[in-house]
Image (cartoon, rainbow, N blue to C red):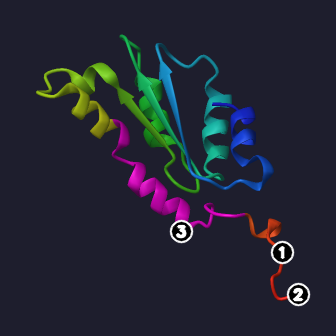
Amino acid sequence: INAEYMGLVTAQGSRDYHILLIIADGQVTNELPTIEAIHRASNYPLSIIVVGVGDGPWDQMLEFDDKIHDRKFDNFQFVDYDSATKNAPNPDTAFALKALMEIPHQYNAIKKLGLLGIDPSLTKNKNN
């Protein structure tokens, strides 16, 4: 999760909704910059889904999912792939449900915050 991606998302005044999917195979090594990036990302129409593959450890990701405060909305979802699919009768469906379960809430929050749509500063006054 970095500033360059967030810059690309908002380039040219675009306020389209995006989902950033990150596949991770280990622990975050730069915790503070990652927390700051997740926090800053809540200023944009962006949902972040991190899927942990392998044996982790995933404690830090779970903290990012639940304990980063003062964001405009809960923009981060972590899914441990093995936990989500183990013992599931339909592993693909179980994974999809777990990974996408917060998207409707996030999308509605983004709409309520006015982060979605055309940047008003880029539209011309049609009455002139």
Real-space Cα distance between discs 2 and 3?
29 Å
Q: Is the Cβ of the residue at disc 2 closer than 8 Å to that at disc 1?
A: yes
Observer-nearest of 64 and 42: 42
Q: Which residue is mark 1?
A: 124
Identity, as a three-letter code, of the amino acid under mark 2: Asn
Q: Residue at x 62, y 53 (%)?
A: 16
Q: In x, y percent, where is residue 52? A: 41, 21
Q: What kind of element bears circle 1? A: loop
Q: Which residues are magenta?
A: 99-118
- The verdict on residue 116 being magenta is yes
* Tag shown at residue 112: 3
Q: Amino acid at mark 3?
A: Lys
Residue position for label 2: 128
Residue 124 location, quadrant? bottom right
Q: Is residue 105 shown above or below 122?
A: above
Q: Secondary structure at mark 3?
A: helix
Q: Main secondary structure of the magenta part?
A: helix
Front one among 62 and 1: 1
